[in-house]
Image (tube, helix red, strand yellow):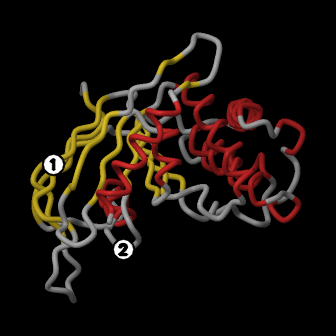
Amino acid sequence: MRNSLIIKNLSFKYEESHNLIFDKIDIVISKGEFVCILGPSGCGKSTLLNIIAGFIKHQHGSIERADKVSMVFQKNNLFPWKTALKNITLALSAQGLNQEESCKKARHYLKQVDLEGHQHKYPFQLSLGMQQRVGIARAFSQESELLLMDEPFGSLDAQTRYKMQQLLLEIRKKELVTIVFVTHDIDEAILLADRIILLSNSSGTIKEEIVINKKKEIEGPVIMDRSQFIEIRNKIFKLLI
């Protein structure tokens, strides 16, 4: 499958409602692409992600996606009685890996998220940002082709949020995974995405798709000209009004 996700003519509404959340939308996401789903609260961003994941059944249309999918939720959903390491090895054991293989892979991904010295700590001993890093390490450890992320940094303070965004970009360079990332934060979408899909607030349609052109240095961060950033930000802001 050349694309990680193909959505055709998707329509959806909740049984108790007469209003369509989505009305015949089409989305194609290529392998390795980072796409942000952006829109105001209540426009159906998280619902769309849950439909892609298979947690919610859609009424019309079709969805083709990669066989192996992982998801990072708004809350980290860690088991409080298990350490950071064991929260990851539990998921890996369910895939059939033995204890040695699970521990080796879990330690690798904890190192990727800069938690190498915290593997034996329980969630209550970790900050909120560190807990979310464990959740991200757990998702990447599945080595899925498609990673779904539902506002994973929404509850973090601005400084921690920025660090997590940079960390995600660094890990993505190494893992080459396709990411669909839900957010209502315009700046976050521009910083992270290769492409932004802007959902309409009321009509259940895609209002606009915006490709983000960035200069990528071989040994450095993703760079965007400040005037380009402001231009895209202003365009999205006007579309959301």
Q: Which amino acid, by three-letter code, is at mark 1?
A: Asp
Alpha-carbon neighbours of circle 1 within 10 Å: few (<14), some, or many (≥20)? some
Q: CA–CA distance between discs 2 and 1? A: 20 Å
Left or right of 144 in this view: 123:
right
The quarter holding residue 155 reads: bottom right
Q: Which residue is mark 1?
A: 26
Q: Which residue is mark 2?
A: 42
The quarter of the image holding the C terminus is bottom left
Question: Which residue is depicted at the point 70% across and 55% down?
Answer: 158
Q: Nearer the viewer, mark 2 or mark 1?
A: 2
Question: Which residue is depicted at the point 20% across and 49% down?
Answer: 63
Please tell me whether mark 1 sits on a helix, a strand or a loop.
Answer: strand
Question: Which residue is depicted at the point 51% across and 28% down?
Answer: 224
Vertical order, 13 against 180 (above or below) = below
Vertical order, 74 against 93 (above or below) = below
Question: Which residue is depicted at the point 74% across and 54% down?
Answer: 129
